[in-house]
Amino acid sequence: MDVFKVLEISFGVIGAGATLLGGLWWVLKNTIVASINELREDLQEIKEQLKDANKVAQDHGERLLRLEVWKHNKFGD
């Protein structure tokens, strides 16, 4: 077999391997980026839900305080 033919085949195999490796890297990178973006969206949703829950808790706390003040004013200690 000719040396140049061996080199041609070797570079062809290396080129195909590099292409496959590049494609695998692209898929892996895009999967990781998509996962990170989905996590960011999930965290934003949780943050909004927490804000809403804190508002409800604060409103509930204010109502309890008004009830205690009313009870104290009406019935004393």
Image (spheres, rainbow, N blue to C red):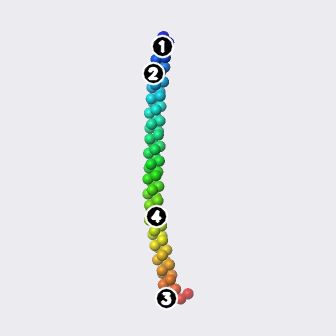
Q: CA distance from mark 3 to mark 2?
A: 92 Å
In the rendered structure, find residue 4 and report the number of the disc placed on it: 1
Q: Name above or below for residue 38 compared with residue 72.
A: above
**Which mark lies nearer to you, 3 or 2?**
2
Q: Which percent across, then down, holds residue 77?
A: 55, 87
Badge 3 element: helix
Q: Which residue is mark 4?
A: 51
| Residue shown at 47% from the left, 43% from the top | 32
Kindly identify the amino acid type of the residue bearing the numbered disc 2: Gly
Kindly identify the amino acid type of the residue bearing the numbered disc 1: Phe
Q: Which residue is mark 3?
A: 74
Q: CA distance from mark 4 to mark 1?
A: 69 Å
Nearer-N-terminus badge (2/1): 1
Residue farthest toward the top in the current orientation of the protein: 1
Nearer-N-terminus badge (3/2): 2
Kindly identify the amino acid type of the residue bearing the numbered disc 3: Lys
